[in-house]
Amino acid sequence: MSFFECRNLKYSYEKKEVLSGVTFSAEVGELVGIIGANGSGKTTLMKSICSLLKGDGEVVLCGENLADKSDREVAKIISYIPQRSGIDISISVLDTTLMGFNAEMSVLSRYTDSQRKRAMAALEEVGIGHLSDRDYQSLSEGEKQLSIIARSFVSCKKMLLMDEPESSLDFRNRNRVIGLIKSKIKTMGSVGLVCLHEPSVALQYCDRLVLINEGRCIAQLNPNENKLEYMEEKLKQIYGNITLAKVNSRIVMLPDD
């Protein structure tokens, strides 16, 4: 049995099937990229995995079926970063990061000095430690995203789910942060699932790719092992006429003229 297994996952909105029997697995330390066109079902898949949406099929983590756990129990082992944080109140960046501990705390307990140190260390790690006292609402969209990524690092969950964490970041931070996420997952002994908007980033950093098209898993790719021609064939089913090329040992996806 794998560390994480998604088995025949299905979900429907108003009788329209959005996910149709998605099955894949992942091992400890792996960063798995979920890629597909807009509206293909990627976000629905992420929400279904962390039990925000209740569909059919099974999600198994460390041998345990998540359907048997309460929402609070799931929150203790899975960290989920949506495309939008949903934070609309005035709160410091440090306090935003400390929220990563909430699932393991009782209602009236306060953050400890150790937790504050860990939160500051996470902010330093993503490069915004100097913004810890700033109001979260005053940050740029990219800085907000870095704050939320730091929040996912503090509590060492068994699984990190991230929905387009690079979408608000500039080129330099995008590559740096995805590389940091990959390294952090290995350090924590976790597994990472990340929806990525840019396929070239996924090909560069992810151990494996799950291709989603119209709610179905049409292929699973291993950029370190599969031939470019094979991956091209599968990626064309989503992106149309494209070419894969190796540039300085990195795989990039280019549109055909």
Image: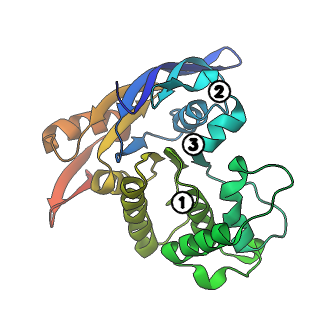
Q: Nearer the viewer, residue 184 or 87?
A: 184
Q: Quadrant of residue 181?
A: bottom left
- Residue 78 has which mark? 3
Q: Quadrant of the N terminus?
A: top left
> Which residue type carries mark 1?
Phe
Q: Which residue is mark 2?
A: 69
As drawn, the label of residue 153 is: 1
Q: Position of residue 58 (x, y in %)?
A: 52, 19
Q: Residues within 10 Å of mark 3 (few under 14, many from 20)?
A: many
Name the residue located 20 percent from the left edge and 50 percent from the top edge: 244
Q: Is residue 141 visible?
A: no
Amino acid type indicated by mark 3? Ile
Spatial separation of the CA atoms under disc 1 and disc 2: 22 Å
Placement of 110 over or under 237, stated as above or below: below
Circle 1: element type: helix
Q: Which of the marked residues, 1 or 2, is nearer the chain's N terminus?
A: 2
Amino acid type assigned to the residue bearing label 2 in the image: Lys
Disc 3 and disc 2 in contact, CB within 8 angstroms: no
User: Percent from the top left, x then y, of residue 3?
Assistant: 39, 33
- Nearest the camera: 17 or 129? 129
Is the residue 183 above or below the residue 37 in the image? below
- Measuring from the top left, give residue 68's x and y in whole percent: 62, 21
Q: Earlier in the sequence, mark 1 or mark 3?
A: 3
Measure the alpha-carbon separation of dots 1 and 3. Answer: 11 Å
Determine if residue 236 is in view. Answer: yes
Of residues 211 and 148, the one nearer the viewer is 148
